[in-house]
Image (cartoon, rainbow, N blue to C red):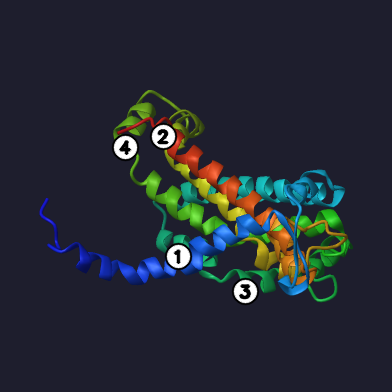
Amino acid sequence: MQPVFKRHGTAFLLLLPTLFILTFFLYLPTIQTFIMSFYQVGFLGLSKLYVGLENYQIIFTEPEYRDIMANTLTFVLGSVTLSMGLGLAFAVLANEKITGARYYRLLLIWPYALPPAVAGVIFLFLFSAQVGIINYFLGQLFGITPDWLADPELAMTVVILASVWKNVGYNVVFYLAALQNLPGDVLEAATIDGATGWQRFWRITFPLLSPMTFFLLIMNTIAAFFDVFAFIDLITKGGPNSSTTVFIYAIYRDGFEYFKSGLASAQSVFLFLLVVVLTVLKFRLQKKVHYAN
């Protein structure tokens, strides 16, 4: 391959703006976060005291942060499972040859185009105990009007539903593309052999979709750790009784409300390492999860 630039200096000059941005807005803040996680930082960073691994010890031993870890796992498991399950179900239905299929696909995908803040406001009004339309219908049909945002379990359910509604379109897009590229001759052979619709889906379609399922599992899990902030900040503010406080919201609360920069940095590093592990798993296992050419 012939080099585009004969002088290395020209190529370096063209890369210089990108290197500048990456260095000052990505690499240096990341390194500073790692360093700060070993310090107890005073108000507005006016003083620093080296405490070693004490911030990490707090995350894994303090009851408050154990609850935050449990909330995070509950949210990730709930949102990823529902989002992927509904995404696959809707994609299978949208893949059928029916009248107006193009419009159905558009309606399934459009919530993903909305900003998370807008989706959060929509669910805040939907599940409001006083003016929410959900309580209006529940009151008319069953005579009950639960206070969704004041009950710890119901509040987490609302946050999970908001995240699922926002992200299910992403899964529909990828599953729909995968379904439309499945080998048709295999499914036709199964139909000729007398396989039912459920048998064709469970024994042929679902295994053939496993590479896409694995990809979406990793991407949805990473997104669940980081993209929930707007929903929690707008709908529950982490309450009631910190029942919806997850790590990404605890980082904001500790860093910008309580000014515990060292503790917030330790949580950021913990989340960063989780994403690194998931990314390594993706690259290591994606070649093994493959059933068709």
Disc 2 marks which residue?
208
Tell me which corner region of the image, top left, top right, bottom left or bottom right, holds residue 158. Answer: bottom right
Instruction: Give the label, 1 or 2, closer to the camera.
Output: 1
What's the amino acid at mark 2? Answer: Leu
The numbered mark, 3 or 2, whose residue comes first in the sequence reads 3
Report if the CB atoms under discs 3 and 1 are less than 8 Å apart. Answer: no
Disc 4: CA contacts within 10 A as few (<14), some (14-19) or many (>=20): few
The numbered mark, 4 or 1, whose residue comes first in the sequence reads 1
What's the amino acid at mark 3? Answer: Val
Disc 1 marks which residue?
23
Disc 1: CA contacts within 10 A as few (<14), some (14-19) or many (>=20): few
Q: Residue furthest bottom?
A: 131
Q: What is the spatial separation of the Cα atoms under label 2 and label 4, in whole angstroms?
A: 12 Å
Disc 4 marks which residue?
184
Can I make out residue 132 in this image?
Answer: yes
Residue 5 in picture, x, y percent from top left: 15, 63
Q: What is the spatial separation of the Cα atoms under label 3 and label 4, in whole angstroms?
A: 40 Å
Can I make out residue 96 in this image?
Answer: no
Which residue corresponds to the image point at 47% horizontal and 30% vertical from the top-left?
A: 196
Instruction: Give the label, 3 or 2, closer to the camera.
Output: 3
